[in-house]
Amino acid sequence: MVHPALEPYVRAVRANPAPHPSTISIEERRATYRQLAEAIRGEPEPVESVVDGVVALEGRTLSTRLYIPFNDENKALVIYFHGGAFVVGDLETHDGLCRRLSADTRMSFLAIDYRLAPENEFPAGIDDAVDVIRYVKSHLGDYAVPDAELIVMGDSSGGSLVAVAAALTRNEGLGIAAQVIIYPTLGPELLTDSAHTYGVGYMLDLDHLRYDYGQYLGEWSDHTDPRVTPLLFDDLTGAPPAIVVVAECDPLRDEGVAYAGLLEHFGVPVELLEAEGMLHGFLRMGALVPEALEIVDDLAEHMHRCVEIASS
């Protein structure tokens, strides 16, 4: 059941449905997404400093934004990959969320402006996630204390990138203390009970998401590739400990629950957190619906526990 505080927004979405993404330009979609992010952001959470920078990788340079909170415990650095169905989103659209998470966890956050589709088709985003994690690990002292633990974190499509990157690098000795996967999308063709129940009229329409998968994948037709559908990984042994966050009224809920189960099957420590009554993207709605952030304290506690275990 949708949380009462979110019901007015559900009614508004149903009364004014967004146009199908095929009918508008990608530039217009990105501008609209930024405007929405600004509208729901609220007053920016104060942090000690925000520093824009770049990461120079082979053949490309990605923009970054480092958030250092007041009372930083200097125990961990979080690399953050934003959501946006692989085609929209940037450092600005998730600025409010990164500020809030950094302040609440008392951890520094490094947000990554990875390459988007359709200009950069699969596997560009995955390549960026993997290469950024490797780069930051080898240059950790540039972003945090040299002995800080590393956490990789992302929401929605960013959560998918984190899941894949953590799986692909699990045998590289990167020492990732945790992978934090927030209401992830885990494939273009998955049919679940939550998708059936919440696939239309609950902030995320699956028909729109499937269209965006088409933009993201381009000519890549093998949806059984675990980089496309992480639930099809045949071995996740040795993957970093995971925290998976799902929303009760999200069409992607069951995918996240299933991925937590898959990780657990391969012996990966997993904590599954479900936000009752919440919708896809609820963490970015905290300024409008404070109840949406109630899970953040719980999430921060679990992240700290992962750091303590990794550093012990």
Image: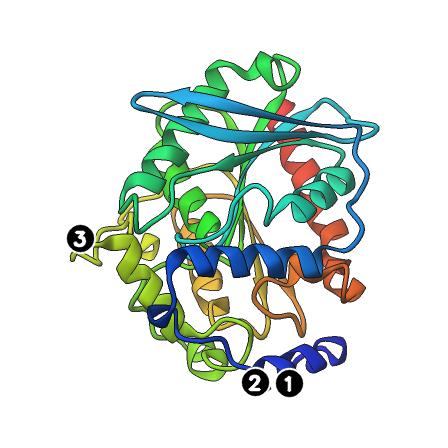
Measured Cα–Cα span from mark 3 to mark 1: 37 Å
Q: Amino acid at mark 2?
A: Arg
Disc 1, disc 2: CB below 8 Å? yes
Crowd rating for badge 1 (residues with CA inside 10 Å; few <14, some 14–19, many 20+): few
Tell me where residue 224 sits by quadrant.
Answer: bottom left
Judge left or right: residue 139 versus residue 98: left
Helix, strand or loop at disc 3?
Answer: loop
Q: Write down the quadrant of residue 235 in the picture.
A: top left
At horizontal 49% and vertical 20% (from top left) the residue drawn is 137
In front here: 147 or 122? 122
Mark 1 element type? helix
Q: Is residue 34 above or below residue 200?
A: above
The kind of secondary structure element at disc 2 is helix
Residue that badge 1 annotates: 11
Task: Say what amino acid the circle numbered 1 marks.
Answer: Arg
Residue 110 x, y percent position in the rendering: 59, 31
